[in-house]
Image: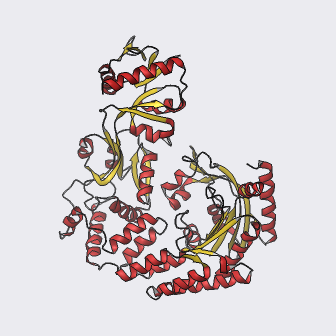
């Protein structure tokens, strides 16, 4: 059997992951046509590249179908309860930086903190008859964050894309979303809450604690870890 | 773990005993409309309850407890006074602790009774004490009504009191509000800047979203007003903190709280109700001299208890949830009754935990 490494199948995340491994003496490449999700590994024997959607990598790690995987801290923490028990962080890759933040319309000049948000949510519910809606795809992380902060009278509405637009469309009053520079938020007339940083995320190499490691997998993992250790 | 059939047999036995105490059996659907529970508990309930959906009825939850459907059934067509009992599964989503069951049986007893709250409280507590007699349990009691009376009578603005009341069941947010209203928290720079202004401030940023400029301006006015209000006095704050820290046997706790009432006289009527309940419990043979009382007890549970609260805990097993728990929830009937309300008190038992503790003995 081989040591399976899951890498996001598309875009800059894949290219940057390939670069990161290349600098450490491991050459990852796509094989076949651009449409085919197959890959090759040079530099470590008995290691296999599996190309997956970034969102599926946490689940595959937790199921033990891949031994290693590259994906964001945000996705691992959102999708895996008690993630520390299922995966181990091997290395932060230094790219794919993104923060999960709470953002409200800039015209809410009275709201700068979670404290304000809680008070505004209470008043909003009294006026409009429903709880203040927060559009997000990170339900668990946002809910746990707000529960911990003691914010009430809000409701999470699911948004899998174009989240910032929900406020203008009035399907949500505010958003909890990933941002790297905050530019999209500003363009949509939104601002960050001062204490509304839910999570700092970056692309990270994870090891599954659940996957089976035979002799070959162990040897491949040790070779890889040595390479990573030497080129830090 | 006890066998499922044994647990069911024990549940049936307990329910028969509650029937003998005068309760009528109610049954409620396993699937509950999610909207009511979400309105009541907020998004937090999603962490505890299983949610499922269909295109026709939308979001529904697998019954996380019986209280809400029983209250609803009573408000629809209950006679007064009424006593109900039920037994059946409840479902609790578990994301952190694999050792906690996500499905277990509860047997409950609920009293809807307008007259003599003290007698109804004592009836429920002593009935539950009787069911768990012989098990190595410690009883804890409290009364959220005393803390609520303390907050309602604070010498501060109505808005501050309403904000504190809203977070009675969220101790951390309650604490931070209290610190702010007492002037213990420094005012953030952004807030100072906002407060240094006058007049209508909206209109400088593009208006987006359903929360309108008038609402923003209303809150700015409210913040300005709040900034002018004097802080909650040190004296009141210390008394409130002393009250929340009371943890003693009932007679000593009562004595301590009567001392605190010198500075917080607003709690005296609630303490009179506690005295009446203590007398009613004593009359029913409860050993109140050695019964524990914690003023802050029940503040972190599901937010509907607003008076007497109790729980029975396995002393040697701090990892186990309470074997029995309950309390008074008058406010819940007000919220679910659409204008109607009726004082209510009740509790639930866990037959599985009872059997588990008996096995060890």
The part of the image, by quadrant, that contains residue A106 is bottom left
The residue closer to the viewer here, A133 or A226, is A226
Residue B116 shows in this picture:
no
Tell me residue A41's x, y (percent).
Answer: 40, 15
B133 w.r.t. A183: above or below: below
Tell me residue B8's x, y (percent).
Answer: 78, 53
Q: Residue at 25% of width from left, 72% of height from top? A: B224
Tell me residue B231's x, y (percent).
Answer: 31, 78
Q: Residue at 67% of width from left, 52% of height from top? A: B30
Horizontal placement of B224 versus B109: left or right?
left
The part of the image, by quadrant, that contains residue B27 is bottom right
Tell me residue B212's x, y (percent).
Answer: 30, 60
Residue B289 shows in this picture:
yes
- Quadrant for the C terminus of chain B, please: bottom right
Horizontal placement of B94 versus A119: left or right?
right
Q: Residue at 76% of width from left, 50% of height from top? A: B2
Horizontal placement of A7 versus B11: left or right?
left
The residue closer to the viewer here, B187 or B235, is B235
Q: Residue at 47% of width from left, 21% of height from top? A: A4
Horizontal placement of B140 versus B201: left or right?
right
Counting the numbered discs, the total is 0
B179 w.r.t. A104: above or below: below
């Amino acid at each position: 059997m081989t040591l399976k490494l899951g890498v996001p199948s598309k875009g800059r995340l894949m290219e940057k992951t390939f670069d990161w491994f290349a600098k450490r003496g491991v050459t990852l490449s796509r094989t076949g046509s651009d449409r085919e999700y197959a890959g090759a590994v040079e530099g470590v024997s008995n290691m296999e590249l599996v190309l997956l959607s970034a969102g599926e990598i946490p689940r595959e790690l937790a199921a033990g179908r891949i031994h290693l995987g590259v994906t964001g801290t945000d996705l691992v923490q959102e999708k895996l309860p008690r993630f520390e028990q299922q995966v181990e962080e091997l290395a932060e890759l230094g790219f794919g930086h993104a923060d999960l933040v709470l953002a409200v319309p800039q015209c809410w000049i009275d709201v700068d903190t979670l404290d304000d948000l809680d008070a505004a949510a209470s008043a909003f519910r009294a006026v409009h008859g429903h709880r203040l809606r927060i559009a997000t795809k990170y339900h668990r992380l946002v809910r746990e964050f707000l529960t911990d902060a003691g914010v009430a009278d809000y409701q999470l509405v699911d948004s899998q894309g174009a989240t910032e637009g929900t406020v203008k469309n009035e399907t949500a009053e505010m958003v909890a979303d990933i941002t790297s520079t905050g530019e999209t938020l500003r363009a949509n007339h939104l601002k960050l809450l001062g204490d509304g940083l839910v999570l700092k995320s970056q692309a990270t190499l994870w090891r599954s604690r659940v996957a089976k490691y035979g002799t070959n997998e162990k040897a491949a993992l040790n070779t890889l870890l040595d390479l990573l250790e030497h080129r830090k | 773990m006890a066998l499922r059939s044994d647990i069911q047999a024990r549940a049936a036995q307990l329910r028969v005993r509650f029937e003998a105490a005068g309760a009528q059996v109610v049954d409620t659907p396993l699937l509950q409309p999610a909207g009511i529970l979400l309105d009541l508990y907020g998004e937090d309930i999603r962490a505890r309850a299983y949610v499922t959906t269909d295109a026709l009825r939308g979001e529904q939850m697998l019954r996380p407890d019986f209280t809400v459907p029983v209250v609803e059934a009573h408000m629809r067509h209950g006679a007064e006074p009424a006593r109900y009992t039920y037994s059946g599964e409840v479902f609790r989503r578990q994301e952190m602790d694999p050792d906690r069951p996500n499905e277990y049986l509860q047997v409950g007893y609920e009293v809807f009774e307008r007259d003599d709250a003290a007698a109804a409280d004592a009836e429920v507590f002593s009935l539950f004490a009787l069911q768990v007699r012989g098990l190595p349990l410690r009883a804890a009691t409290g009364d959220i009504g005393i803390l609520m009376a303390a907050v309602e009578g604070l010498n501060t603005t109505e808005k501050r009191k309403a904000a504190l009341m809203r977070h009675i069941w969220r101790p951390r947010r309650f604490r931070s509000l209290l610190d702010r209203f007492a002037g213990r928290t420094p005012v953030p720079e952004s807030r100072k800047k906002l407060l240094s202004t006058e007049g209508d401030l909206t209109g400088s940023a593009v208006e987006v979203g359903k929360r309108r400029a008038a609402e923003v301006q209303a809150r700015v006015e409210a913040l300005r007003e709040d900034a002018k209000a004097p802080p909650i006095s040190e004296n009141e704050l210390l008394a409130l903190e002393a009250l929340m820290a009371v943890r003693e046997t009932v007679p000593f706790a009562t004595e301590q709280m009567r001392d605190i009432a010198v500075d917080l006289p607003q709690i005296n009527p609630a303490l009179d109700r506690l005295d009446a309940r203590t007398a009613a419990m004593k009359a029913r043979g409860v050993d109140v001299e050695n019964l524990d009382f914690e003023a802050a007890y029940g503040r972190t549970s599901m937010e509907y208890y607003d008076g007497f609260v109790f729980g029975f805990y396995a002393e040697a097993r701090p990892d186990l949830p309470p074997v029995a728990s309950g309390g008074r929830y008058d406010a819940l009937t007000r919220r679910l009754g659409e204008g109607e309300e009726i004082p209510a008190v009740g509790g639930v038992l866990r037959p599985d935990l009872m059997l588990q503790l008996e096995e060890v003995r």
